[in-house]
Image (cartoon, rainbow, N blue to C red):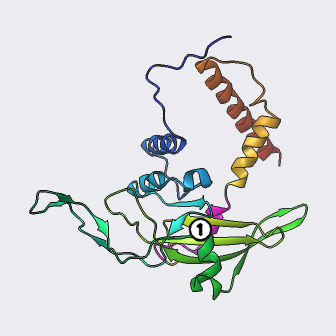
Amino acid sequence: AKKTYVPGDVVFQTKPQIALNLIDRVKANGIRVVAWTADEGYGRDGAFLDGLDQRDEAYVVEIPPNAHVWMVKPKVLKTRPNIEADGRKKYPRLRSRERQPSEVQNLATYSPAYRKQTPQKYRTKETHHGSDVWEVRWAPCWRKTHTKKLVSNQCTLVVARNVLTCEVKYFLSNRVPGRDGWTLRQILRVAFGRWPIEDCFRETKEELGLDHFECRGWRCIHRHLFVTILSQLFCARVRQQLS
């Protein structure tokens, strides 16, 4: 069997690490993005969210039901490392009597902030089954970080339930409605904005041959990917002109 040779300067990186590098490249090229969105695979990665916060990038990401957040901001003690009399270092830590963070699925069910809240209806798109409508509730929260801060800035936890299928989604954003010009509708627009991207991948695979190739070389794979995406861009431009 023919082997695939990867260049020596390519090192292993997780998908969230690759994503942060791509974001840095995008910013270096002068492109500015209003907000980033991602699925649970990225939303469960605290280091990825920390990286976006450090870059001052807005995000609205989907998180798994067992993700943990605080509804009340915990207090962090010893914000700077210091040396005790016995020579041991004491690092930032949470106050001992602080509550542990709770799973978002439990907060959506038992927290008064959600139980006493009247859901707002949000329509995402039209399907052959009718309008895709979600009942939305939200509340401010804080997440645990992997930095010396230990606790993030105030975030927004959105709980959305599909009216037809009863599917429940959880979204976390580092932007809060009513602050810095952000509204709940803007956050929801970003949160549910992934389906056009998924549709693009479907088109490239089913119509343009993204997954119909037989090559194992590093450069060959990249060339095939570039040609497929350029073909999709060409088709999109032609469709836009003709419509």
Few, some or many C-alpha atoms within 10 Å of disc 1 (few <14, some 14-19, many ≥20)? many
Q: Given the current orientation, which residue lies at the most extreme left position? A: 85
Residue 182 screen position, x and y as percent: 53, 72
The answer to whether residue 119 is seen in the rendering is yes
Q: Quadrant of residue 112?
A: bottom right
Is residue 68 shown in magenta? no
The answer to whether residue 186 is seen in the rendering is no
Q: In the rendered image of this protein, does residue 97 appear above or below residue 193?
A: below
| The residue stretch that appears in magenta | 179-193
Residue 222 screen position, x and y as percent: 62, 25
Kindly state the secondary structure of the residue where label 1 is placed.
helix
Residue 115 screen position, x and y as percent: 64, 85
The residue tagged 1 is 187
Q: Nearer the viewer, residue 34 or 82?
A: 82
Q: Quadrant of residue 216?
A: top right
Rendered residue at 49%/60% (across/down): 58
Q: In the rendered image of this protein, does residue 4 appear above or below residue 125?
A: above
